[in-house]
Amino acid sequence: MNNDVLDHAAGAAAGPAVVDGVAVARLYGEPLFALPTDLYIPPDALEVFLEAFEGPLDLLLYLIRKQNFNILDIPLASVTRQYLTYVEQIRKSNLELASEYLLMAAMLIEIKSRMLLPPKKSADGAEAEDPRAELVRRLIEYEQMKLAAARLDALPVIGRDFLRAQVVIEQSLAPRLPDVDADDLRAAWADLMKRAKLNQHHTITREQLSVREHMSIVLRALQGRRFAMFEDLFEVTRGPQVLVVTFIALLELAREHLLEVTQAEAFAPIYVRLAYQPS
C-alpha cells in the first residue's frame, strides 16, 4: 500500500461527488442518492504495511524510482522526508518491524549531514569521496539482483507453468526368452565336434545315414518331454558322421517349425523342445 491509497481515502473522506446533478454515485448502474451509514472501515485500513517491501533498500529504491530521481544524484532531503513519513506510520503500531527501517533512516540523515559539512581532502590531496557513493552502490547492486530475480521468476517452472509428461507402459509379466542366434549354435556345434574327436575309432565302415530317419529319432526323443538339452540329442560315441546328420536333422526340424531352440538367458545352456503339444 502506498500514498495512492492514502490520497484515495482522503478524497473519500472529503465528501462524495455529485453524479448527474442529483445522485451522489451509481451502484450497479442504479443512482445512489445518499451514502450508506453502515459501511465498516477497519481502523488500520490507512496504515502503510512495510511487509509489502522486502527491506529498507526496497522501500528506498521504490521512492527513488517512483519520482524518477537519478540514482547517481539522489536528493537526500526529499527522499529522507518521504522515507521518514512511511516509517513513522508503522512505528506507532509495530516498532519491531520498523526497527531496521529506522536504521536506514538514520543512515540517510547521517549522509545528509556529511554532505552539509565542507569536504575533507585526503593526505595526497585527492578529492573526498561523495558520501552517497556507498549507498548508491548498494542500491544499484540491489536493483540488479531484483531484476535478475524477476527474470528468473518469469521463466517457465515445472509444476507451476507446465507439467512433465509421464507415459506408463504396461509390460507382460511372462519372461521373454532370448533368441538363439547363429553364433550360439556354431559355438555349441564346435564344442560337440571337439568332444567327438576324443572318441574316434579306427574301424573303417561305410554307413548309410538318412536325414529323415534322424529327424524321426529326434522327434521321438522329445516326445513326452518339456525340453531336452542340445547336447543330449547327439550320440557322441557314434562319430562325427552321425553328429553331422543329426545336426542337419535338427536344422530341418527348426526350419519346418516342428521344434524350437531356446535358452533361459544369454550364454546359458541351449535347450530344444517341440513346437507343438500332442493331444
Image (spheres, rainbow, N blue to C red):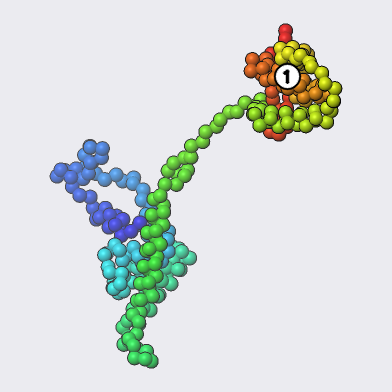
Q: Residue, x 39% and y 70% (percent of image)?
A: 138
On screen, residue 62 above or below 182: below
Residue 199 horizontal/vertical position (percent):
84, 28
Q: Residues within 10 Å of mark 1 (few under 14, many from 20)?
A: some
Check the picture and name the quadrant holding the N terminus. Answer: bottom left
Question: Nearest the camera: 170 or 77?
Answer: 170
Residue 136 horizontal/vertical position (percent):
35, 72
Q: Secondary structure at mark 1?
A: helix
The residue sitting at the front extreme is 204
Q: Quadrant of residue 175?
A: top right
Q: Tell me if residue 147 can be seen.
A: yes
Residue 247 horizontal/vertical position (percent):
72, 21
Q: Quadrant of residue 240?
A: top right
Q: Residue, x 45% and y 68% (percent of image)?
A: 100
Identify residue type, mark 1.
Answer: Val
Tag 1 residue = 245
Residue 51 horizontal/vertical position (percent):
43, 59
Question: Nearest the camera: 190 or 153?
Answer: 190
On screen, residue 6 above or below 164: below
Does residue 48 appear left or right of residue 260 in this picture? left
Q: Residue, x 27% and y 69% (percent of image)?
A: 70
Q: Quadrant of residue 219?
A: top right
Number of numbered discs visible in the structure rendering: 1
On screen, residue 243 above or below 19: above
Q: Tell me if residue 216 can be seen.
A: no
The residue sitting at the top extreme is 279
